[in-house]
């Protein structure tokens, strides 16, 4: 307020001093304002040895008969001495107070005490000492020597030491506590944020899913338990503080994100167009309103009429598709099959309108937060894929078209009987080819290579398991495969040979694969002969296992087997 008033007064006086043609109107307040400005300037510019000069004495003894006062009086029409004097005294007092505060901005005893206390507090914590500021502060004699207080008066010295001690205590305690608790605080803050980041994504997915499934809003329905969160995000390998913070952040964000996504889906239901129709046992075709997506259900797929709905999500501009380029909206198929019966020998065909690159384009199925490529046929203006009817359910399965610029073209799989399955696993990142851009589908596969593919298909956490490969005599030859061999042998999926070696480079036979797969699947049985018969029936490819189960399996046969197991179960 003082600064504002002062600026106003400066402007007034400047106008008075530099006015050459206009005489100011005679008002009582003008004398006061001119006096205030003169008193303020005089008080602020006073010499240090005038600090005890009162405002009244400054006016009568110093200013009243000065040339500056006389010059100013001549500029003011209807000058009033009493109003000028009152303004001068008020301005002088304000300037006196303001200058006094400015001179005291640096509080040396407080600033020095707090700084030294902070240094001592942090040092004591790092040295493993208990928090004790009294033991850390220098004695009064040492303080006097450090800051040469013996040159000051006894009252100044006493006040300095008292203020220094109070500030030292404050600085010491703050620094000690910060050193002790700040790392934990940072960990908790980071873990909570990490949990929130994941909870937002998962909660949103389930919120929208529940709305489109016709379920009531209830975030607890699919909320994972603390143990599930810990296991799913490998928190048991981290500090307990981080685990607690992550779980708290996850649950908090999950609830908020779930509710927002559910309500947003409700509000945007008009934007996310949906069609619904009854598919009779004779089959039928469902087409979206935009005519860009079609579902063709062959006759006899279901043993009873089913209700099929398609929800269109206009999400082409959304992010989060990694290296994939969106080539269509997303379509969620919900299918209600009250009888529960399905003929799995039938295949449902999905079709997208498409005019892009024929090699790089493809249909993808959403799996959690990932998109899985489905073997796709691309023609002019259309791409299509066939899926097992078991994939569709009342909860909804989402499909979309993408272009994958990273797709590799292996020259030796063109026209191969397993090209679809190989292409699917290559695009999903499960397998890769060789540096010469070949895949070598008919080459045999080693024991270690087979385990590596299994680890990727079934998401084995090969870096966090007990056991040791050192029990094998040839463990030194395992190299890159050491962790996956350790995982597989620990879980008894595979074992070594009677001579104490594992022999990771040995080619693996059909018989060995059958044994391993039955241990991996556990809850279901696998007979290689069934896989071989399907190859013969579907692909017109005859397996060498018909000659002997001890013959060696090929890379293509492994991919064909795993793709059909995971896709159809």
Image (cartoon, rainbow, N blue to C red):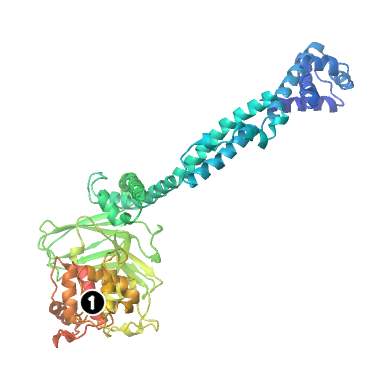
494 vs 135, left or right, is left
The image quarter in which residue 282 lies: bottom left
Give the image location of residue 360, x and y in percent.
37, 73
523 vs 49, left or right, is left
Q: Which residue is mark 1?
A: 560
Q: 128 or 435: which is nearer to us?
A: 128
Give the image location of residue 77, x and y in percent.
84, 16
* Number of marks: 1
Residue at image coords 64%, 26%: 158
Residue furthest to the bottom: 547
Q: 519 or 118: which is nearer to us?
A: 118
Give the image location of residue 194, x and y in percent.
39, 51
Looking at the rendered image, the quarter that the C terminus falls into is bottom left
Residue 532 can be seen in this image: yes
Whether 90 is drawn above or below 340: the answer is above
Whether 71 is drawn above or below 204: the answer is above
């Amino acid at each position: 307020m003082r600064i504002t008033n002062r600026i106003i007064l400066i402007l007034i006086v400047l106008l008075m001093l530099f006015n050459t043609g206009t005489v100011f109107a005679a008002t009582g307040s003008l004398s006061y304002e001119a006096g205030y400005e003169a008193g303020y300037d005089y008080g602020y510019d006073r010499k240090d040895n005038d600090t005890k000069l009162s405002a009244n004495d400054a006016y009568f003894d110093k200013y009243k008969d000065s040339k500056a006062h006389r010059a100013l009086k001549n500029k003011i029409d209807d000058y009033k001495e009493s109003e000028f004097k009152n303004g001068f005294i008020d301005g002088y007092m304000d300037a006196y107070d303001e200058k006094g505060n400015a001179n005291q901005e640096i509080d040396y005893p407080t600033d020095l005490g707090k700084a030294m206390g902070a240094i001592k507090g942090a040092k004591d914590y790092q040295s493993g000492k208990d928090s004790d500021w009294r033991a850390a502060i220098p004695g009064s004699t040492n303080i006097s020597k450090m800051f040469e207080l013996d040159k000051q008066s006894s009252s100044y010295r006493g006040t300095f030491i008292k203020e220094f001690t109070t500030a030292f205590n404050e600085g010491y305690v703050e620094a000690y506590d910060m050193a002790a608790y700040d790392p934990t605080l940072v960990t908790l803050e980071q873990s909570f944020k990490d949990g929130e980041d994941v909870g937002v994504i998962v909660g949103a997915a389930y919120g929208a899913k529940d709305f489109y499934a016709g379920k009531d809003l209830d975030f607890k329905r699919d909320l994972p338990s603390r143990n599930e969160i810990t296991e799913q995000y490998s928190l048991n390998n981290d500090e307990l503080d981080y685990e607690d913070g992550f779980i708290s952040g996850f649950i908090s964000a999950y609830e908020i994100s779930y509710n927002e996504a559910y309500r947003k889906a409700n509000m945007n239901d008009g934007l996310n167009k949906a069609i619904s129709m009854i598919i009779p046992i004779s089959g039928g075709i469902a087409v979206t309103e935009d005519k860009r997506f079609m579902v063709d259900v062959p006759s006899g797929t279901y043993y009873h009429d089913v209700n099929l709905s398609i929800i269109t999500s206009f999400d082409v501009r959304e992010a989060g598709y990694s290296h994939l380029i969106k080539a269509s909206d997303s379509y969620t198929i919900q299918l209600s099959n009250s009888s529960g019966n399905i003929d799995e020998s039938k295949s449902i065909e999905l079709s997208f309108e498409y005019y892009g690159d024929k090699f790089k384009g493809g249909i993808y199925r959403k799996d959690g937060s990932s998109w899985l490529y489905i073997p796709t046929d691309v023609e002019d203006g259309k791409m299509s894929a066939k899926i097992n009817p078991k994939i569709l359910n009342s909860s909804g399965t989402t499909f979309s078209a993408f272009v994958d610029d990273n797709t590799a073209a292996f020259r030796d799989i063109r026209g191969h009987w397993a090209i679809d399955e190989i292409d699917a696993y290559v695009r999903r990142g499960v397998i890769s080819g060789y540096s010469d851009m070949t895949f070598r589908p008919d080459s045999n596969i080693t024991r270690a290579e087979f385990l590596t593919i299994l680890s990727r298909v079934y998401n084995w956490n090969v870096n966090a398991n007990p056991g040791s490969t050192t029990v094998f005599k040839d463990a030194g030859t395992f190299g890159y495969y050491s962790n996956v061999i350790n995982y597989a042998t620990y879980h008894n999926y595979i074992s070594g040979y009677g001579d104490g070696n594992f022999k990771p480079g040995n080619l693996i036979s059909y018989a060995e694969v059958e044994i391993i797969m039955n241990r991996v699947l556990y809850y279901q049985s696998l007979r290689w002969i069934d896989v071989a018969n399907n190859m013969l029936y579907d692909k017109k490819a005859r397996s060498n296992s018909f000659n002997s189960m001890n013959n060696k399996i090929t890379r293509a046969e492994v991919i064909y087997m795993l793709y059909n197991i995971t896709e159809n179960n």
